[in-house]
Amino acid sequence: MRRPVAVAGAVVALVLVVLSGCTGGSGEAPKSIAGKGGSGAPTVAGAFGAPPRMPSGDGLPGWAHSLGFARDGSGFALLVGCVSAEAAPGTGFCRQQVAVRDAGAEEWVVRRSPLPEIPVSDGASANLLALGPGRALIEDGGGDRPERTWFTRDGGRSWQPVDRRTVGVAAEIPAGAVLTTECAAPAGALPDACVRERLVVVSPDDGRRRTLAAAPPLGAHPQPAGQPEPDGSWWVSGTDPLTGRVAVAFSRDAGRSWTVSRLPSPTDRPGWRVVVAVGPDAVYAAEMGELTGGEPVKNPMRALHRSVDGGATWQRMWTTGPKAEPRTLMGLPVPGPGGRVEIGGELSGYASVDGGRTFVRLGGGHYTRRTPLGLLREGSRCQYALTADGVRWSEFRLACGDDAG
């Protein structure tokens, strides 16, 4: 069954204490981000404070995936619980439900989902998008299976079928929305056959998809971040149409306009994508793509770039070589104050206190992604943690039963 990817010297002790600890933390949290005015990022009071607290749901049935949150602390996750006969493994069925945390609630509750029971041999293929307080979209099917979607605006108490086809145009990206892509030419083609993609907004009002009116000039295959960063900025990566080299674009007005900046890539070969994370005093952009030399790795990271003016200009801090680690990245880099940044690799994590020029090794690797509550770290089994400042983490657990592993 498919499960989510879990995904020198004196400074080592400092890095291990500051960056790898999963505690509530103490001390003054950074309160602003560099780059006031002009093209820099605005000051965001409180955006990088203490980590939000989330109750655990150890006893939820089955295993959890597609975990998502809203800014008010409400959340959703899909649950898959399977039953099969010991004498005939793989012949049973799986029930798909929804775990919901209402805003301010002290526990997660299980609610029915519109998803059908499925044979154990099929595996879970549905996905959930959190779209703001009490709102979410469930997507199922695709490929050889009919595509079906359902939307809730009442915390999963009821679900309505939604037409997945894109309708109309969005002038801006509303709060709670998700930014994604769809194939524009040929229309409806699968990713491998798509010649040109366009940016699409998944609306928190009705779960429908709408084409974003203004899109940055980043080639035929733009790669958007699904969520905004703590300063409210939205990011898309792609290629500079003039040079064909790696570039990113950011918007600080909800997608109505975009600013494009080129990255100082170590190669002129097109990469896979660029993932961006805004921290308390710097923005980090990890350039993903195949490496030159050394053993092949999954999720290869070519280079790590840093900006201290909100993304207007960049400095390449780390160039991945044949041996020196980190060579991979699972999800997003985790920026902290004062030049701190952490990279979650395939087998281990790595931390820097000098903006990414040098790294020391930490514990096991983690997959990290952006949510409206902060960065969410997904570990093995049922372990999760949230951070707002890249230093202090708040841990919680979901669906830790016998069949959650």
Image (cartoon, rainbow, N blue to C red):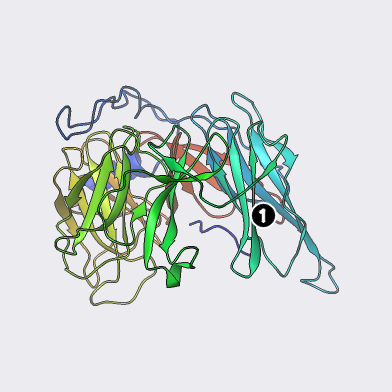
Query: Number of callouts in the render?
Result: 1
Across and down, in percent, residue 326 comes to: 29, 61
Q: Is residue 297 above or below residue 389?
A: below
Residue 297 relative to residue 382: left or right: left
Across and down, in percent, residue 199 comes to: 39, 51
SS at mark 1 in the image: loop
Residue kind at label 1, given as amino acid type: Ala
Q: In front here: 341 or 70?
A: 70
Residue 268 relative to residue 218: left or right: left
Residue 153 relative to residue 235: left or right: right
Across and down, in percent, residue 286 comes to: 28, 55
Residue at 34 percent across and 42 percent down: it is 19
Q: Which residue is mark 1?
A: 404
Position of the N terminus by quadrant: bottom right
Q: Quadrant of residue 134?
A: top right
Residue at 66 percent across and 60 percent down: it is 124
Across and down, in percent, residue 386 comes to: 46, 38
Q: Residue furthest front?
A: 168
Q: Quadrant of residue 393?
A: top left
Residue at 42 percent across and 56 percent down: it is 365
